[in-house]
Image (cartoon, helix red, strand yellow):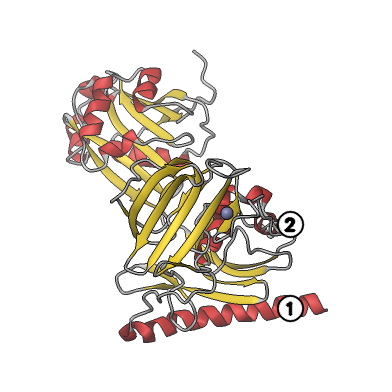
Amino acid sequence: MRYPKPHFFLVGVLSLGLTTFVIAQFNNDAEDDRFTTESVLLSIPDVSTNRLAGVAEDNLPADTPTSSATARETFIEKSAQVAPGDSMARIFKKLGIPGRELALLLESKPLGPRLKNIFPGHDLRFTLNADNELLKLAYSPGPLETLEFERVGDRFIGHDVQRAPERLTAYKHAKIDHSLFIASQRAGLDDALTMRIAQIFQWDIDFVLDIRKGDEFYVLFEELYLEDKFIGFGDVLAAEFVNQGDSYQALQYEDPHGQKGYFNPRGENMKKAFLRAPVEFSRISSNFNLRRKHPLHKRTMPHRGIDYAAPRGTPILAAGDGKVVTASKSSSNGNYVVLQHGEQFVTKYLHLSKFARGVRAGRRIVQGDTIGYVGSTGWATGPHLHYEFLVNGSHMNPRTVKLPDATPVPAQELEAFNTQARPLISLLNNYKQQIHLALVR
Ligand SMILES: [Zn+2]
């Protein structure tokens, strides 16, 4: 058998404990292991005939397996990266590790069951003895976390090893020309971070219909580094979005219970009782409507709602917390959903291709839950969501109607909010000034 990257480690010092060795090995091995590798790693003199055997055992940590003499002779390390469609059972089979070992691992509470949720790209490292008994498994679901399972007799004990990344703050400014996502990419932000920025403002700004050329945003955020290597974006600390000349500022605040949220500089919650756009706009963003496009609609019918042209299948989100009053079908509405929010408010969603699972009359709904999918059932010429907003039974424009305020920062926390938030807002404002100076120059 040929190994893509064989490496052999000789350890001469007998007193070096097994655990220590394995950890050192994991840390030193930065090899590319996209492929399954298998190598015999360790040769130790036959301990059973060695006078020092007793001493060596005394030096081993108490929970180190000492099953047989042969087990101490050779350790085999195998590693794998989860491929699409892989399951743990399949990986065990591929590497020739008995399924019994997997069963033992899964029984290890509370971390064992996490091995059922493995995703492509995750790394696995196995240490076995010559009897093909698994001694250790290290599983890394991401660069910051490793689950280490160690054999102790006939069971495994799991440890969750967390690594703290270095957090650096960075600023970006983006001006929208064609789409929010294109502007963000040009500024060096990935789509996931752009989504998070948009989500902060989704109660104030309709990211499907209201984004215009010339809109811009400023953002102060964290970059995460591990050993000087960029590994991803951390929190968005502060942001300002300018939409059609209106400016919205948001600051991250962590309350005394460790709950993080976004508030404007006055301490008012960015979250409101109703979302601006009840559709998942990330799905629409690729062909973002910069000019407001009105879908073909029966001219003779008074138009009492807002239409969101969106690809068929785009998730439709509950605009607010509430209860499903109707999930039904009619010749004009097609498949439609009516939600009741408290005493006063009702929202309606028409022309759905289908309902989300479990959406039926009487069901409680949380804001942002998917209730159905965009379609063109009923009187619709193309896929779109027709959305209506009623206050005390009358159709209202959800953009202009007065809505209940969401929970602000509690009075007793305002001082903490001000000490946390003020520096962020001045940092963001300073950055804004620099950008403007640079643009004028
Ligand atoms: Zn309509």
Quadrant into which the C terminus falls: bottom right
Q: Quadrant of ligand 1?
A: bottom right
Label annotation for residue 436: 1
Question: Is 144 placed left or right of 102 in the picture?
Answer: right
In the image, residue 333 lies at what x, y percent? 49, 47
Confirm or deny contact between disc 1 and disc 2 (CB under 8 A). Answer: no
* 285 relative to 85, above or below: below
Q: Kindly state the secondary structure of the residue where label 2 is placed.
A: loop
**Residue drawn at x 67%, y 76% as measured from the top left:** 245
Q: Is mark 1 within 8 Å of ligand 1?
A: no
Mark 2 sits near ligand 1, with its Cβ under 8 Å away: no
Residue 179 in the image: state x and y as whole percent: 69, 56
Q: Earlier in the sequence, mark 1 or mark 2?
A: 2
Against 440, is 278 above or below? Answer: above
Q: Is residue 421 above or below residue 44?
A: below
The amino acid sitting under disc 1 is His
Relative to 73, 204 lies left or right: right
Work out whether residue 227 can be spotted.
Answer: no
Judge from the rendering whether residue 299 lies leftward or rightward of residue 368; answer left or right. right
Q: Secondary structure at mark 1?
A: helix
Q: CA distance from mark 1 to mark 2?
A: 21 Å
Residue reaching furthest to the top? 1
Pick the residue in front: 59 or 405.
405
Q: Quadrant of residue 339?
A: bottom left
User: Dot 1: within a 10 Å radius of its alpha carbon, few (fewer than 14), some, or many (20 or more) residues?
Assistant: few
Residue 91, image quadrant: top left
Q: Residues within 10 Å of mark 2 (few under 14, many from 20)?
A: some
Q: Which mark is residue 259?
A: none
- x and y percent of residue 45 in the render? 31, 24
Residue at which label 2 appears:
178
Q: Amino acid at mark 2?
A: His
